[in-house]
Amino acid sequence: MPTDEEQTQRTSQPTVGWVGLGKMGLPMARRILQAGYPLSAYNRTADRARSLAEQGGRLLASPAEVAAVSGVTFSMIADDAALEAVALGPQGVFQTIAPGSTFVDMSTVSPGISARVAEKAREKSVAYLRAPVSGSTVFAESGRLTILASGPREAFDACAPLLQQLGQKLYHVGPGDEARVLKLLINMMVGTTAVMVAEALTLGEKNGLDWAQMIEIVQQSAVGSPLIGYKAKSLTEKNFPPAFTAAQIAKDCDLALGVGRETNVPLPVTALVRQLYGGMLATGRGPSDFFSVLYLLEEMAGLRPRD
Amino acid sequence: MPTDEEQTQRTSQPTVGWVGLGKMGLPMARRILQAGYPLSAYNRTADRARSLAEQGGRLLASPAEVAAVSGVTFSMIADDAALEAVALGPQGVFQTIAPGSTFVDMSTVSPGISARVAEKAREKSVAYLRAPVSGSTVFAESGRLTILASGPREAFDACAPLLQQLGQKLYHVGPGDEARVLKLLINMMVGTTAVMVAEALTLGEKNGLDWAQMIEIVQQSAVGSPLIGYKAKSLTEKNFPPAFTAAQIAKDCDLALGVGRETNVPLPVTALVRQLYGGMLATGRGPSDFFSVLYLLEEMAGLRPRD
Amino acid sequence: MPTDEEQTQRTSQPTVGWVGLGKMGLPMARRILQAGYPLSAYNRTADRARSLAEQGGRLLASPAEVAAVSGVTFSMIADDAALEAVALGPQGVFQTIAPGSTFVDMSTVSPGISARVAEKAREKSVAYLRAPVSGSTVFAESGRLTILASGPREAFDACAPLLQQLGQKLYHVGPGDEARVLKLLINMMVGTTAVMVAEALTLGEKNGLDWAQMIEIVQQSAVGSPLIGYKAKSLTEKNFPPAFTAAQIAKDCDLALGVGRETNVPLPVTALVRQLYGGMLATGRGPSDFFSVLYLLEEMAGLRPRD
Amino acid sequence: MPTDEEQTQRTSQPTVGWVGLGKMGLPMARRILQAGYPLSAYNRTADRARSLAEQGGRLLASPAEVAAVSGVTFSMIADDAALEAVALGPQGVFQTIAPGSTFVDMSTVSPGISARVAEKAREKSVAYLRAPVSGSTVFAESGRLTILASGPREAFDACAPLLQQLGQKLYHVGPGDEARVLKLLINMMVGTTAVMVAEALTLGEKNGLDWAQMIEIVQQSAVGSPLIGYKAKSLTEKNFPPAFTAAQIAKDCDLALGVGRETNVPLPVTALVRQLYGGMLATGRGPSDFFSVLYLLEEMAGLRPRD
């Protein structure tokens, strides 16, 4: 709850625009609104936007309309194609965004599409921040995302109070597309971690280890990352409510492998891991949580008939 | 520092035997001695044993001699061949060990050789504990190892006070060779983690990310396991004093893959990771710390001339 | 040497257009010309086109100019981007090509770009044949290429006499983009074969087998494909004049993996093979013949200091 | 049909012994017998030996009994353990074999066990030929196996007339265990070929290519090895009568990977291929023909419910 003084200070800030109210975007936009910033928003499907309107957000008809009235415009969308449409399309942000204002894309997209947005931003004298985030929906709701940002330092500093509404771990990692690469290399490790754990647990399972105790010990071990901790309950119960899907991690691995391809960095393990997620997509399990790659490994080991 | 009462209690315990005074075994044996237990020991090369003698340990000429005078005999050796010699060989523990006493092997070896030791133990009415440990030399010195034990529950309970001198995290995971498999599946994840990190950091490096900041952020991220934390300084400085070598992790991957082979569990990522460590061994870097697999990935990416 | 009658018959055919006079395109166009067909041609760099002019070919200033005067227009270019420019660009074939005429692309490109060309062809009522070829320059010169064609059957039949100038093995494999996929799946096997051979020979080499005899025996064995036969001399002499480069096979693997990604077909071995070629590209060996991946494996095995 | 003179010459040869009358060994032994050589034989299960007796072979009760009466003793058995028993066991060949005679093992086993046999042969002044073969049962019956032999040159020359009854392609590849390694490196390529083909055909299948035509074209292509030719009919009909099983190729890959491990040769593709065969073994398909790994790839691609 901001004090009156903070409130005044904030409303003296340029209004905030938000494009993309999906599973991540909606709770993020809501936090900005709750912090007292005036907020205009757009979502492709109006339904999701409605709840934001009830909390005082202003719904507009296109990214272009949002950018026209905002000093800082955020986007949080699904992939390269969506960023292209939202930023560069005929109803996109760059049709209307004012010189001197700021565009902050928080999506996980390729450095390639991001570089094209950067070029357009330069043309239009707009400050462009890449600010992809780590953390699931729960973290988005509680403002505990990790934010990896790159782009002009001054724009980053100016936006820091806004970004801190979304996440306390806030890093500025370079003047250009560095944040894109950093996000992807973390996510490729996220993808490898799930397969690494799936192989190990399957080996233990087939050799008669106690399932729950094994997971407990793995979690307590040197390889027990926070990610494994978050997933320990799901693994123990073999029940994976989809937080981050196999299709999403496959997409992120593809983006990382694409960076590897374009900059000539061999990534043999990631390449193999990607094909295993491909095995999930091919068998209709793209929408499942990516940690259910455990089932794939169990199938390969003859421990489970295929779904 | 034990109280007098504890001291009394302990000295009423059967004397302790220790076979294998290597980088891990010596500090472990020393802790047992310092806790007030009478200790007889044997090491293949006498040099390493000498310092133990100065602290009150009694040096004997063979594993058989050690076992002859000990109620609980420990071994901490390098590999399957060493366990075979030390336990089953003509000067080995099972030549002399008394019925009703306990043999505790703390090495990382295959379930196969362990099963042969188990058979011999059954024949001789000896309680056989498998108690492989996780943790490096530093952890061995400070008694903070993780101990994964399996074998007869009563023997485990009886040995718990001794084992607690070596590590606070102490688990009993089953009546047979479960601890062997569990240790190996954790170590195969240890091996995969280093390659996973090496791929990711190499990708970031070639794309111009700030090296130190990237490592800091990876460490703070969801994949930032304790292992990555321990190695953060080494990675940042690209200086890897050999704690756990490439040759050792390759051996442990081989053991894990061997369990996978014998119990039909496909481990595609581990198999690939093993071959990358093979690339270190083939180029004379078996004795290097396993995290220096980073150099191999940098070489593959054209970032570093080969050593 | 055609008979007079054949000559008459052929000159009654619509004139032939040819776009792309690279290492493959030039000898192919020359064969068409030598068979008596009037030929107009375009190449991005005029130098290569000159020799064709000396043999009676007519050089024009753009793909559009070529298509404007040709009943059948061929293209043989490097990659997706080149096909996009040559077919769909502002100076491209589809700016001028007449309804009822035929466009035959013989390049190795993705089904994706090919589908876009197909759409344009439908719009313009142009018959569109995809006709990628297998075989190196030597095969192009002697008219012994293998041609995998797909697209409208009637257009294929009408073009068969022309295509037979280029290759005797001529297949019609479907009405749409089937030839694209078939070409890519063969080339991904070509890429895997080289790595498969490199692993095997390196294993033999390090174990003291006679190099030349080993290659002879492999060539005579059940796995001794024609490809291995073509390469036996190069392998024996460890001298690989670049016929098909590492960069080209990496590109084709990428296209095949792209098809796998879009149609959900896991290709774990191909994915790994691609990363090994990536190791060649990253170390400046993209322009080397792809069979020199042998050197990479020898380096990994410690048999050869890095180039 | 040998001439009388040949017959005389042969019967003046020392009698031949044969140990191991399995799918390969029986037709091989039968060819020796039919060529007019007196033959004593042993098989673990007597049933298989009976048919040989009807053709004039003499059945004995152990490898030791066979070796006692033979100038040249052959063995053709399943694996390392069988060779150890048959050669070095208490009823084994080396219990009775005479100094100056020859022992020829034609099995596919590791260089490790072979080296132990070699040592024993040296002790006993026996000439020891390693002569593993390539080719299936059909080739064994018709005497068209490929024989890769190593060991003493004089023994090889002396045995050549016998070996030529079994295969025309007969190579002497070194004085020691070279033939073991060569056989394994060929077989690892055999294993990789099947997976390579399975990936490619699955990609084509899911993209709508005509199944039979695709296989025909692959067979005619540069990668169309004899092995693919032998398997074309099976692939086309998706019907794989077990000639060489998944379990056997997995074993041979393990032996090859073992040589790679002991001599430090990274074999990343072979290692991955092995794990895919592991997926067959784990799902009860070890006894299936190894080319039915196609089914596994089809399952991974969602083209086939699991068996």
Image: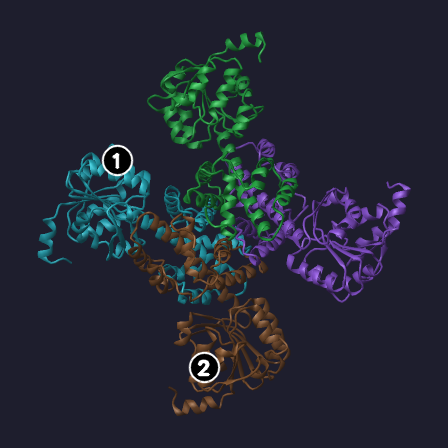
Chain colours: A green, B purple, C cyan, D brown
Mark 2 nearby-residue class (10 Å; few <14, some 14–19, many ≥20): few
Q: Tell which of B161 and A7 is nearer to you.
A: B161
Q: Secondary structure at mark 2?
A: helix
**Which of the image's four quarters has the N terminus of chain C?**
bottom left
Pointer 1: residues within 10 angstroms few (<14), some, or many (20+)? some
- Along the horizontal axis of the image, is B254 left or right of D138? right
Residue D169 x, y percent position in the rendering? 42, 73
Asked which secondary structure carries label 1, the reply is helix
Identified at 58% across, 75% down, the residue is D86
Q: Which amino acid lies under the numbered mark 1 shown in the image of this protein?
A: Leu
Q: Is residue D205 left or right of residue D282?
A: left
Q: Chain of mark 1?
A: C
Q: Is residue D111 visible?
A: yes
- Tell me which residue sits at (28%, 36%) in the image: C85
In the rendered image, which residue does mark 1 sit on?
Answer: C88
Q: Which residue is mark 2?
A: D51
Residue at 51% across / 17% down in the picture? A32
Instruction: Identify which amino acid the numbered label 2 is placed on.
Output: Ser
Q: Nearer the viewer, mark 1 or mark 2?
A: 2
Q: Is A22 in front, or is B278?
A: A22
- Up-down relation of residue D130 to residue A99 (above or below): below
Same chain for the residues under marks 1 and 2 in the image:
no
Seen in the picture, residue A182 relative to A211 is either above or below; the reply is above
